[in-house]
Each structure stands twice: as structure tokens, then as C-alpha cells.
Amino acid sequence: WDHSKEKEYRISYRYRNLQGNEEIFRYTGRIRKEPTGRPLRMGAMTCQYHTGFPYSPVVRNLRLKNPDILYFSGDQIYEQNGGYPIKREPEDMAILNYLGKWYMFGWVFGDIMRDIPTICTPDDHDVFQGNLWGGGGIPRPSGTASRDDIMGFTQTVRMVNVVNTTQCSHLPDPFDPAPIEQGMKVWYTSLTYGRISFAIISDRIFKSGPNLVADWEGRKDHLKAPLKDPSVIDIPELTFLGERQELFLKNWITDWKGADMKVLLSQTPFANAATHHGEQDGYLFGDLDSGGWPKKARDRALGILRKGFVFHIAGDQHIPSLIHYGIETFRDAGWCFCTPAIAVGYSRWFRPDELNIPVNNRPEHNLPNTGEYIDGFGNMNYVYAIGNPGNFAGIADRYKFQQEKSAGLGFVEFDTENRKITMESWRFLSDVANPDNESQHPGWPLTISQMDNYGREPVAYLPTLKISGDPDPVVEVINQTTGELEYILRIKGNEFTPKVFSNDRFIVRIGYPEKGLARELIDIIPDTAFGASELRIDFN
């Protein structure tokens, strides 16, 4: 495939109409040439609730922004969409019920998607569940379909596989295609486009359920007050991404062929960045449906990702946010952009200030409810920006209603030349062609560096690497004492001073994976001074 040239395509479908006559339907579109020599532009969206249908302001702005690639992170359908209720059984009727709602997604965005590469991932509502704790594909116990706090899938595996097929079958082949429990298909994979390497995963399908650890009254996923012993809900047996996806990520962060930066695409942020749920006074100390739980597994995932300087895009929360993750300390891992919902049903707020939750290091913009907070599970989150809902009560106009509920459009620009990432969060009724100071949610836009996605402070530095050869090689730093990967990235230019996090000896590998060229240096001793010495590596 020559990705440097634009191609027209046509799909023909032969069928019989209601009169029994054979007809042919043709669908045409354009496959754009892969963008090079300029930033890659992504439209990033989530959650399409029926009260904003057909989301015309968002669609208009998306067309005007003219992205190179689209990401729909989940909840492409809701149970209420289409004006008809879901049907859980019999199986064939449940599938038909889903497809009708799925077609509505196509009616809205199909004309845009026909010419723009699109990544789509299912979330909980796509499989008719308010929350999903997949447990690796296990079925839920009978009689629990109305519960949002029980592990497993409610619908049959055949229906779930239809959802996975309709939304993900066009993606690259899975890293490991072996089915999980019940014969359920998996779709976690990677895609490189416009010199950005994307990992596409599920943070729901393998996740443990709160019913395994919660012993309080009421909903097991809603923690309303601190626990005397928080460790009881963070036992080692709990899973988040699961062993298979963790193995995939460990492999993915080391593969830099054709890529300058790495981005994770999943459904929800790996943080508990909402204090109120459903109603303005609906305070929760912790939401186990958030990506902040289970903490140990969450930290392990972030520990893998930061070694590749990975930026995270997610959705699901119905409240846009910009969060710099922390593991051992604040801001020592990567950044996450939680995009606004296309249209919001269930509202959430992040209002720690009025709860007198301690905060440090507010950003320079000094917006309320921003800064360094520890969430209900002990995660250290630097919340740079939050798009809390306004006063939407009583608004009859469905578009103005969504404007106040913080709906809108997420947009990301990846500048591979300068290794910068710019995030935009456009309000539902904004006009991207004529923006003003209120067009985006407060705190946006923000531009960060690729290097900000491993914010851990160094203990020391290795000698400055001066590389004779093509620019932008891949540099891999390995702790020689432990054998652990410290990190790996494609540097910019021909010089790089590696930071390290101990005084051990290190191995450094420099290479050009597209050419199969590599050099290895061993027994490198760090220095507390930046640039205290240099090492020259010749590829000429």
C-alpha cells in the first residue's frame, strides 16, 4: 500500500429489496494520504447521549477542524438512544436492538468517517451495561442485569462479539487474538499513523469487580467515606488492564518503527477525578468504576507507560479534564486528556475546594479545583484543568442544555517535528472558526512536551550522547544492575543527555530500527551533574 498517495474506494453490496428484486448499494469514499511534514490532527470524542442528538454543533466544528484521524473512545450508543428501550433477550432481538442504535451513530458521523481513518472502542453502555467490570470475559450471575456493581458481562457472548466486530473489526489485528472467557473476541492492538504510535486497549474487559472486596451497604462501587484500612480494597489479586494487555504494552513501548511519539487510547482516565455524581450534592469519596481503582494495578500500568513517554487520551467521565499522573510522587508519570462528552446524560463534578480537600501547587492560571490532589484511593493527581457543568436545570433547548452540561469536542495536535502535544476542549455551542475566550472549557488549550510524559525527577545523568549518523535515533536506557528498562524513546536530533533514577551502572542502546542498525554501550556510570561528560557514537 502506497500511503503517500490519495485513493478513492467503492464498496458494493448486493441485496434484495422488499419486493424481492435484486439491487446493488454502493458506498464510496476517499482514503487520504498519510500526513507527513506537519502535525497530526485528531478529533477525540466520547459518550453520545440521545438528548443532544444529532449533535449538529459538534459535527459542524469537527468538519471545520478537518482532523486527520478520529477517536471515539466509547459509549457510541446508550440504552435510551433511538427513543426505544433495550431488549436483552432473545439473543437475536438484542443484537438487532443494538444495531439500530449503532446505525444512529453512523447517521451522525458516517459522512465524516468515510474520508477520515477512525478508531472506535466499545465501553460499558455499548454492551448494555451502566458499568463494566469484565473479569476477562466472564458472564454475570443470573438475576443481576440491573446491578451496576457486579463483575461480568450481562449480555451473551455472541452479542458482545457483534459489538466488538461492528466497532473494532477494521483495526489492525490484535496483539494476541486468542479469545478470552466464553470465546469472547479481543481487540487490543497498535496502530502507527502520521508517525504517532497508538496503543488501543480496553480498561474494562479485564477489570475486577468491586463485589470481590466491598463489604459496605449499598452500591459496592460507590465509596461514600474513607475506609479505616484502605488496603482491603487493593488486594494483589485484583486486575485492571490484565496480564495480557500489560504484556502487550511492555512490547509496544519498545517498538519505535516509523514513530516519533507514543499515545495510549483507552476508555477512562486512570484517576478518580470526580467528587460528585448524578446530582450536585451526590458526593462520593471514591468511585470504583473510575480508572483510579484498583490502585496497585493502576500504578503498575502507569509504570509501564511512562517508560515510553506515553500520552493518554480517554473519555467516559462526562467531564473534561487534564491530569498529570503521579505514582510515587506527584507528576512523575504521564499526562491524560479526558475529552468532553459529545452529549452528557449522567453528570459528574470535580469540586474538591468546597470540600476543603487539601491542594498544593495550583497552576499559574489559578483556576478553582485545580492543582495537586490525592484522590479517594490514594492516587496523586495533578489536575491542570477541569470542565465542570454549569447550571443546566430547567433548560428546554437541548443544545443549550448540553452546553451547560460541559459537552463538546476534544481535539489534539501532535507536532512530531517539535515533539509537542496541544489539547483543545471545545464547548458544545462554540464556533471553532470564530473562537472567543469562552469557546473552550477553562484551562484549555494546553501544550506539553513529549518529555513531560515521564515527569520523574532524576537522581543523576549519564554522559551526553553525541551521535554521528541520521537524526532522531531511538535511545534505550537499561539499569545494568537490575536488568530493568529505565525508558526508551526516539530522541530529537543527534544529542541526548539521559536522566536516570539511581547511581547504578547502565546500558545504553542507540539504534535505527527501520534500518536494523544498533550500538550498545555498557558499564556507564552516572554523574549528578548534567552534561558532565560525553560519549560519541558513530554510525557513519
Image (cartoon, helix red, strand yellow):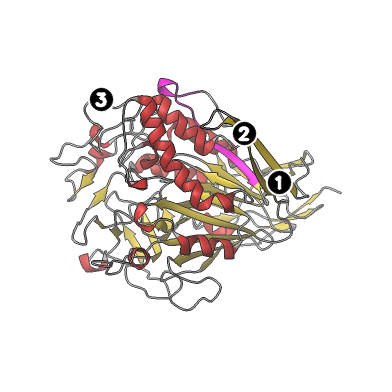
Q: Nearer the viewer, residue 413 or 438?
A: 438
The picture places residue 9, in percent across and down from the top left corner, at: 71, 43
Q: Quadrant of residue 360?
A: bottom left
Contact (CB < 8 A) between labels 2 and 3? Answer: no
Q: Earlier in the sequence, mark 1 or mark 3?
A: 3
Q: Which residue is mark 2?
A: 23
Q: Nearer the viewer, mark 1 or mark 2?
A: 2
The picture places residue 523, in percent across and down from the top left corner, at: 66, 43
Q: Which residues are magenta?
A: 179-192
Q: Dot 2: within a 10 Å radius of its alpha carbon, few (fewer than 14), some, or many (20 or more) residues?
A: few
Tell me the SS state at disc 2: strand
Q: Which residue is mark 1?
A: 258
Tell me the SS state at disc 1: loop
Q: Which amino acid type corresponds to the residue marked 1 in the rendered image?
A: Gly
Q: Quadrant of residue 139?
A: top left
Query: Does residue 405 belong to the magenta stretch?
Result: no
Tell me the SS state at disc 3: loop
Query: Is 289 on the left or on the right of 417, as rendered?
Result: left
Q: Earlier in the sequence, mark 1 or mark 2?
A: 2
Q: Which residue is mark 3?
A: 141
Q: Residue at x 44, y 59 (%)?
A: 55
